[in-house]
Image: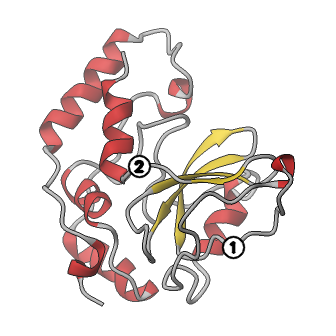
């Protein structure tokens, strides 16, 4: 597999994104926007190309281009939709709901297995089964109430951010990572 397999993407303008996030923070000093008390409008440092490559080699994948560029040009997580964007290899406290999902994503072969879905998958609240596969995807954020954002790493929908609501709504397809994050940046 090569990086061409997961698409090409224009590099992110890191300075512009960081400036926009700083502006968002100044415009919301009381941290009233959902999730902002958690991420505080702070972005983590960017990742070096070598660090990204090590992660890709360990997991046998190429990260989707728009996400990969974000890590290298903007930040390794921090401020973002809902409770923010997790860092690529960020450790999550074992008391948090995200802990088991992050550990699942580190299992050998989990990310390199093609994501099996091409359309939404109903959860138990919609008459579906809660035991659907999420292999080939990486949890990148928490929405709250047991709902998560998953970046599809492998398969036909690589690069898309899907909503994962295992207790009620199942899996819902979403936009490319760039569109997903940019929509958050554009929200007043």
Quadrant the N terminus occupies: bottom left
Q: Secondary structure at mark 2?
A: loop
Number of marks in the image?
Answer: 2
Q: Are marks 2 and 1 in contact (CB under 8 Å)?
A: no
In the image, residue 76 above or below residue 115:
above
Compared across the picture, whether 131 is left or right of 96 comes to: right
In the image, residue 133 above or below residue 124:
below
Q: Which of the numbered marks, if any, corresponds to residue 133?
A: 1
Query: Which residue in the protein does label 2 denote?
Result: 175
Residue at screen point 18% across, 67% down: 8
Residue at screen point 31% across, 25% down: 186
Quadrant the C terminus occupies: top left
Residue at screen point 24% across, 70% down: 7
Label 2, residues with CA under 10 Å away: few <14, some 14-19, many ≥20: some
Q: Secondary structure at mark 1?
A: loop
Residue 164 rendering spot, x and y as whole percentages: 65, 53
Looking at the image, what colour scheme do you see? secondary structure
Residue 89 rendering spot, x and y as whole percentages: 47, 66
Residue at screen point 42% across, 58% down: 160
Label 1, residues with CA under 10 Å away: few <14, some 14-19, many ≥20: few
Residue 98 rendering spot, x and y as whole percentages: 67, 55
The one nearer the camera, 166 or 89, is 166
Q: Which of the numbered marks, if any, corresponds to residue 101?
A: none
Compared across the picture, whether 184 is left or right of 174 comes to: left
Which quadrant of the figure has residue 34? top right
First of labels 2, 1 by sequence position? 1
The one nearer the camera, 186 or 95, is 186
Residue 61 rendering spot, x and y as whole percentages: 39, 83
C-alpha span from label 2 to label 1: 20 Å
């Amino acid at each position: 597999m090569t990086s061409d397999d997961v698409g090409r993407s224009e590099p992110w303008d890191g300075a512009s994104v960081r400036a926009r996030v700083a502006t968002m923070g100044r415009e919301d000093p009381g941290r009233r926007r959902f999730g902002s008390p958690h991420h505080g409008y702070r972005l983590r440092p960017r990742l070096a190309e070598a660090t990204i490559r090590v992660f890709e080699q360990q997991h046998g994948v190429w990260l989707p281009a728009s996400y990969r560029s974000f890590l290298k040009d903007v930040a390794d997580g921090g401020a973002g939709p809902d409770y923010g964007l997790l860092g690529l290899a960020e450790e999550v406290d074992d008391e948090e709901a995200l802990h088991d999902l992050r550990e699942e994503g580190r299992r050998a072969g989990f990310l390199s297995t093609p994501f099996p879905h091409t359309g939404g998958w109903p959860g138990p609240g919609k008459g579906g089964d809660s035991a659907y596969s999420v292999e080939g995807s990486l949890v990148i954020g928490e929405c709250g109430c047991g709902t998560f954002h998953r970046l599809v790493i492998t398969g036909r929908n690589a690069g898309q951010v899907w909503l994962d609501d295992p207790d009620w709504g199942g899996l819902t397809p979403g936009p490319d990572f760039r569109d997903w994050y940019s929509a958050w940046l554009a929200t007043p």
